[in-house]
Image (cartoon, helix red, strand yellow):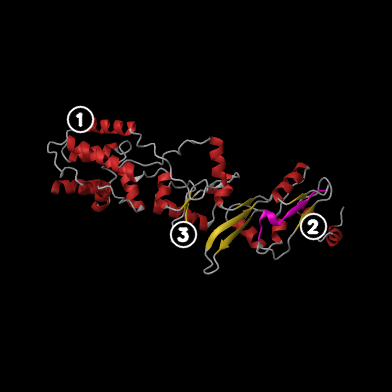
Amino acid sequence: MQDVGAIARRDDGRVAMAIICGFTEGGVWQLYCQGPNYANFRTSSAAVIAPDGTWFGNLSLGVALAESHGCSINLAPYYETFDEGPSALRTAIDIGLGPGWAVKYQRQRRNDEIVGVCIWSPRGEWYESYHDLVNNSEFEFSDITCPWFIQRCRKAEVDYFLPPGSGWAASLGIVKNVYSPEGDLYRSHLQAMIAARVARPTGVLVREIEDYQTAVRGAHPRSTQRVMSATKLALLAGVSSSVIKRCLRGRNGLTTPQALYSISRCFDAERNAVALQQAAEVDGVDTAMYQRLMSDARTRRMDDRVYEYARPVPFVRSAYSRQLQEDLGANPPPPPEAPAEAIGIDDAPLFLLFQTMLLLM
């Protein structure tokens, strides 16, 4: 058996560290360490020297070669030599990644706020975010129990109505950065909502609102401006009348996530068809004529390719997303539609308010 202590003294600990981490097959391996105070865990700071003298500056490549020789590698002892290494190993266990993984938070100097994370696997792979980890390993977003990441996902779900449990995450500060499940960065939360298909662009919504208003007025015995006015449309959608008025005048009134989401959900002529028809019937329309006018309006929208709008372009596209785009070609399929239940009388207090207001007008 090799004298690890003697080898460590002779080779500055490189061989000893390699043996401790599992580089035991195929000859004498060396694992080059930068020293106990070196704080950067990235693979560029490490090196594996194979028995034939080949130098691998990328740690994970060296590990892959060693495993091909029958070695069983776990780099936890190597990570322990780094600054904050023991705490990084404990953090990985605490958040559900397991033994041998290391997780180190990136913090702002002025207030110690967490702004990022670096993750290292027992085999030397380095991940710059939880999205990077999930997209390049067997982990799922549900496996990660990091409070910081869970809070970011919760903010995306609650504040921006993004699909829960899917990996959408939002910055916790005043900057409205949003990250997609693929790791793409959107600098606008409104663009992220459109990219996630929980909302539609303002131009599309204006067309849908105008078509609905026209259909109701066309099927009403009194085709006046008071029939399905902007105020009534606002009551139906649960937003202020000024938002609807600005939209109908060609101005962008959808500047808040709540307004964009509410109007997108309300005037979805397919998934919210029942509630829209109920509101029209309360207003006194001829149901058959209303249905025909709505069907004709949808046909015109499809002919005009209203729904073939381009997805918002991320401010920064992740490496995983770029690879997906290359694999799928120039026109990848759109993401699945986000689930959205129709608003009916039984589950929409806003509709009851709308009905009451109509009776008072």
Position of residue 121 measured from the top left corner of the image (x, y, whole percent) = 65, 51
Residue 270, placed above or below residue 195: above
SS under mark 2: helix
Label 1's element? helix
The picture places residue 355, in percent across and down from the top left corner, at 19, 45
- For the residue carrying disc 2, how many other residues have a C-alpha within 10 Å: few (<14), some (14-19), or many (20+)? many
Q: Amino acid at mark 1?
A: Ala
Three-letter amino acid code at the position of disc 2 = Arg
The image quadrant of residue 227 is top left
**Residue 82 among magenta residues:** no
Mark 2 and mark 3: Cα distance apart in space: 42 Å
Residue identifier under label 1: 288
Give the left or right position of residue 304, taking residue 358 as reference: right
Apparent side of residue 359 relative to residue 340 in the rendered image (left or right): left
Q: Earlier in the sequence, mark 2 or mark 3?
A: 2
- Where does residue 81 sit, x and y in percent of width and height? 71, 62
Q: Which residue is mark 3?
A: 172
Distance between the alpha carbons at the discs numbered 3 and 1:
50 Å
User: SS class of the residue under badge 3?
Assistant: loop
Residue 14: image tag = 2
Which residues make up the magenta segment? Answer: 40-51
